[in-house]
Image (cartoon, coloured by chain):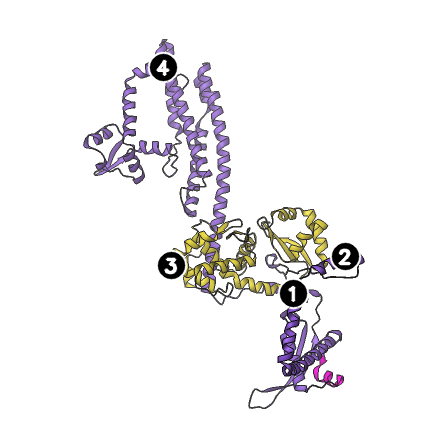
Amino acid sequence: MIEHGPLLERLLEGEFICSITDEHSFHKLQNDELVNDLNHFLRPLNRRVAKNDDGSVYFLAYCDLTQNARQHLSHQFASTVQSLLPMLEWMQLVQEALGRDGALNAGDTIKLQDFESKVVDNQSLIHRLAHLANDRVFKSTSDKPDMQIKQVFKRIKEMGYLHQPHKDRLFYIVTGKVEQLIELVRFIKDEENLPIDDATPEQEAMF
Amino acid sequence: MSQAPKHKSSAQSNPLFELGKERLELIGKHADALMQGYLEGQVNELAFSQQALQKLLDSRILFYPQEQSLSLRPIVNELIASLTLDERKRQINTDVGEHLDQIDTRVQSLQAARKKGDYAASEHHMQLLIERVNDMTGQFGDAIESLWHRLNTEFGFVSSLDDKILEIELAQRQLRRILDGFGIINFDDLIQLAGSDGALRKLLVSQLQARISEHSGSLLEVQKRLVLLMARFRQQQDRALLINRMAAFLRQHPNFQIGDYPNRSQVPAVINQAHGISPQAFVALDRARDSNTLAELARAVPREPEQASQSDKQNEGFVMAVQNLVATQQKQLAKDVEDFFIRVIEGPEALSGVDYLAEQVLPWEPEMWLFQIVAEYQGLPEHNKHSFMLEKDSAQQSRFNQLHIIQDVKVGMRFSDDYQAAE
C-alpha cells in the first residue's frame, strides 16, 4: 500500500486521474485488485474509487450518501451546472476556431497561439470570446483577446478539464474529465427529456 | 508481363506501337493544360494552338460533351485520378460479368485455334486471356487499394464530418459491389472451361483463386475498419450535436431548472464525486528519533521576517501609544469573545451571550459584547461558520418601522456526523 500513497493522496484531494493527467496511475487503476485494496482503505473515509462510463477517467465517489455527502454533492452539482453553458460554449468556440470536424475529445491538444491567431482573425469569434470571458465562471476583466484567452484557459485548467504539460509553454491537452462532463450533459438531456434530440434549429426557435 | 521481352521486336513492329507512343507523348507535351483542365473540370481552348487542339481531339484525349465546352475524355480523367490517387474522382469499376464473358470468349477462340493447330493464333489468344485475367484482378486490386488509401487518410479529401460519413457510406456500397462481384465468379465453371489444359487451369483456377481469396481477406479488413471509423465519426458527430443543441437550449432557457439529483433517493453515478480533502501533518516532538531532523529543519528556517516585525513594533510604540491602548482593550474584548466560543465548543448545548457575560463578570457593556459576538461569528471563515449555530433573540421595537433590537444571542455547535463538516 505504501507505494500507492501518492496516488491515494491525489485521489483524496479530489483529482481526476486519466491517461492524460497521469498515465502511470491510470494504468494502475485499471487493475481491479488494486482498486479493491484502495477501496478497503478508503472505506472509513466514506469514499470509493469510481470511473466514468467508458472507463477513461477515475475519481473518488461517496460510498454512503450521508446528509453531509448530499450537501456537498448539491453544492458541487450547482457549480457544475453553473459552468455548464460556459464550458459548452468554450468547446464550440475551440472547435470552430481551430476548424475541427468533431467536438473536443480527451487527448486533443490546443496550442494557445494557434487558437489566438484564429480568434483575432474573425470578428465574430472575438465577440464570442469576450462574451465567454466575461461570464462569472471565467471572470476576466481584460478587454484584450490574448488576456481573455489566458484567463479562460487558466480557469478551465483549474477546473480540471485541461492539462498543461509544461508550465511555461502555452499548450494544453484536454483531459478525461471532459468525458465526464459530456456524460453529464447526456444524462441531463435524457433525464429532463429535453426536446433537443431531433429538433431542427427552426423547431428549437419555437420553444 | 514476363513474356514482354520475348515479344519486344514483334511488339515494336506492331503499327499500334507508334500510334500509342505518339499519343502518350501528346499527353506529356500538353501536361500543364490538361492538368489544369482536370482540376477545373473544363479545358481552356485558348491554351492550345488550332493544330494542337485538333490533334488532341483526334487522339481521343479531349472532346466536346456540349457545344463550347471542351473537356478531358472520361477515360483520361480516370487515368489521372488513378495515377495521382485522387480519391475525389477515382472510380471503382467492379463490373465482373463483362470480364467473365470476355474470358469465356477468349478461351473458346483459344481452343478453336489449337484444334486447327494454329500455333501463332493460339499464342495470341493466350496472351489476351492472360491480360484479361490480370485486368480483372488488377481492377479489384485497384479498388481495394483505393479503399485502403481513403481509410488511411481518414477520408481527408473531404473536410466536413457529414461529408466523411457520406463518403464512408459510398465506400461501403463499393465494397459490397466488389464482394458481389467475387460471388459471380464461379470456379466450377472456370474449372470446366479450363478442361484438362494445365496452363489454363493454373491461370483460371489456382492463380485466380489465390488472388481472389487474398482480396477477400483484405476486403474483410477494410470492412471492419470502415465500420470502426464510421462508429467513431458518428460518435463525434453525435457529440458535436449534443454540445451544440444543449448549448442552444440553455441559451434559450436561461431559467431552466435542473433536477435536484443530489437529493434524490437514487443519486445518479455521474454526479457522485467526493469532495477533496487535503491530508495535512504538523511538526510533532513526541518521537525522539525525529528530533535531529526537526532541529535541522528549524535551523534552516530563514530569520529575516522576525526582525522586521520587531522593528514594526518599535515604531508603533513611539507613534501610536493612544491607539494602542484602545487596541489593547479591543484585543481583550476579542479574546473574551474567543473564550466564549471555546466554551461553546466544549459545552454540550447552546450558550446565551448575556448569561455568559453575567456569569464571568466581564467588564463589557452588553450591547458591545453582543455586537462583538455577532461580528466574530460573521468574521469566521465560511467552512467554520457552518459548525456554529447563531440564534438572535430579537424583538421588533415598534409597529411603525422595521427596527429589531437584539436582546441576546445564543450560540451552539451544529453537530454533524463526521469531520466532513469541514467543507
> How far apart are the alpha carbons under marks 3 and 2?
64 Å
- Of residues B389 and B164, the one drawn nearer to the viewer in this rendering: B389
Q: Which residues are magenta?
A: B351-361
> How far apart are the alpha carbons under marks 4 and 3?
69 Å
Above or below residue B127? Residue B257 is below
For disc 2, the marked residue is B292
Say if labels 4 and 3 share a chain.
no
- Of residues A206 and A105, the one drawn nearer to the viewer in this rendering: A105
Residue B352 shown left or right of residue A207 in the figure: right
> How far apart are the alpha carbons under marks 1 and 2?
23 Å
Picture coordinates of residue B230 (x, y %)? 48, 43
Quarter occupied by residue B156: top left
Amino acid type shown at disc 2:
Asn
Amino acid type shown at disc 4:
His
For disc 3, the marked residue is A123
| Residue B49 among those drawn in magenta | no
* Rendered residue at 44%/17% (across/down): B200
